């Protein structure tokens, strides 16, 4: 089932009794759960096991909910569960953070599955702008784009961070966003380690801004930097001694990391200053 089809079903109050949510974007999936809950006029409850829901459906004839089963892999292995969950004509969502799209389960239940895939950058920007307008907040287009980029084009992260702006409730929120981007905001963008190493070897000063986003352990970074410097040295026929200096620096700093004589953050700053 496509998301647009689910939207239409919600608007027409024709929500399917059983659905499977594949939620790469958990915030987006959660928004639909809330909409479905409102449309059905039912509270939603989370369960860890399908068996718990089946027991609840067979014994609790008085209270009705939107039943949500979280990441129970037994449903993937036993097709009987979906058959049983669909019988009582209650509203059930089987929710997965991860789902193998090549599996038999996925192929056999396409009509039930709603995939909340990662959104594209333009779509996320449009969603953020809509949310700001809904809350009567004014933020310029360039700031919204930068905000989305800082969240690594992840809609869930955007929504979490946007709460900080919405909580303040400033009608003109440009200054708030400016402050967040400079001082009070987490930069979720990750630096590709090999691209970062090439920037280091090319003496690109932007590495000082990117280093805080490097997720690679320092030992791994030093090892790969050594290898790339060696490859460049060999490419010059051993003539460019600058790469020899970088290799020697990597070796000495590697020892400092392993014996704990110097702080890792200090070592990285020291290396960049020496190389750049």
Image (cartoon, helix red, strand yellow):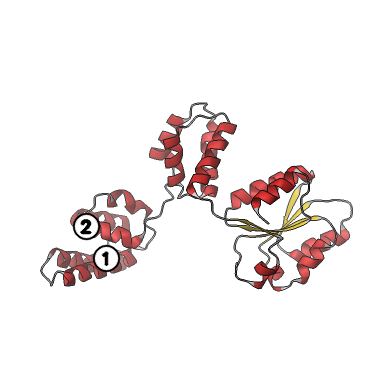
Q: How many marks?
A: 2
Element carrying mark 1: helix
Provide the secondary structure element on which disc 2 rests: loop
Q: Measuring 74% from the left and 50% from the top, which residue is drawn there?
A: 44
Specify whether 159 is left or right of 107. Answer: left
The image quadrant of residue 232 is bottom left
**Residue 225 percent across, percent down from the top left:** 27, 65
What residue lies at 70% left-to-right and 50% top-to-bottom? 6
The answer to whether any part of residue 263 appears in the image is no
Horizontally, residue 234 falls left or right of residue 97, namely: left
- The residue singled out by tag 1 in the image is 225
Marks 2 & 1, CB-CB < 8 Å contact: no
Name the disc covering residue 163, or none: none
Residue at image position (43%, 36%) is 143
Q: For the residue carrying disc 1, how many other residues have a C-alpha within 10 Å: few (<14), some (14-19), or many (20+)?
A: many
Mark toward the start of the polypeptide (2 vs 1): 2
Q: Nearer the viewer, mark 2 or mark 1?
A: 2
Q: Residue furthest left?
A: 239
Q: Compare residues 58 and 260 and report the one nearer the observer.
A: 58
Query: Looking at the rendering, which quadrant does residue 59 occupy?
Result: bottom right
Give the Cα distance between marks 2 and 1.
12 Å
Q: Is residue 58 visible?
A: yes
Residue annotated with mark 2: 202
């Amino acid at each position: 089932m496509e998301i647009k089809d689910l939207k239409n079903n919600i608007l027409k109050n024709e929500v399917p009794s059983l659905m499977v949510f594949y939620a790469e974007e958990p915030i987006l999936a959660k928004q639909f759960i809330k909409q479905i809950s409102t449309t059905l006029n039912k509270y939603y409850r989370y369960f860890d096991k399908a068996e718990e829901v089946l027991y609840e459906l067979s014994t609790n004839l008085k209270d009705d909910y939107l039943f949500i089963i979280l990441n129970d892999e037994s449903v993937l292995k036993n097709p009987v569960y979906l058959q049983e969950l669909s019988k009582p004509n209650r509203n059930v969502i089987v929710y997965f953070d991860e789902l193998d799209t090549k599996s038999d389960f996925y192929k056999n239940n396409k009509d039930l599955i709603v995939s909340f895939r990662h959104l594209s950058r333009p779509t996320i920007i449009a969603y953020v702008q809509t949310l700001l307008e809904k809350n009567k907040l004014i933020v310029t287009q360039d700031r919204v784009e930068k905000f989305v980029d800082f969240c690594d084009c992840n809609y869930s992260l955007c929504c979490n961070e946007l709460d900080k702006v919405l909580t303040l409730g400033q009608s003109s929120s440009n200054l708030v966003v400016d402050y967040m981007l400079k001082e009070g905001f987490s930069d979720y963008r990750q630096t590709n380690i090999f691209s970062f190493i090439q920037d280091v070897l090319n003496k690109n000063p932007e590495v000082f801004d990117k280093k805080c986003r490097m997720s690679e352990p320092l030992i791994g970074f030093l090892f790969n930097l050594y290898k790339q410097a060696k490859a460049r040295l060999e490419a010059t026929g051993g003539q460019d001694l600058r790469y020899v200096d970088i290799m020697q620096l990597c070796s000495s700093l590697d020892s400092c990391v392993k014996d704990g004589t110097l702080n890792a953050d200090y070592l990285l700053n020291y290396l960049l200053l020496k190389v750049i």
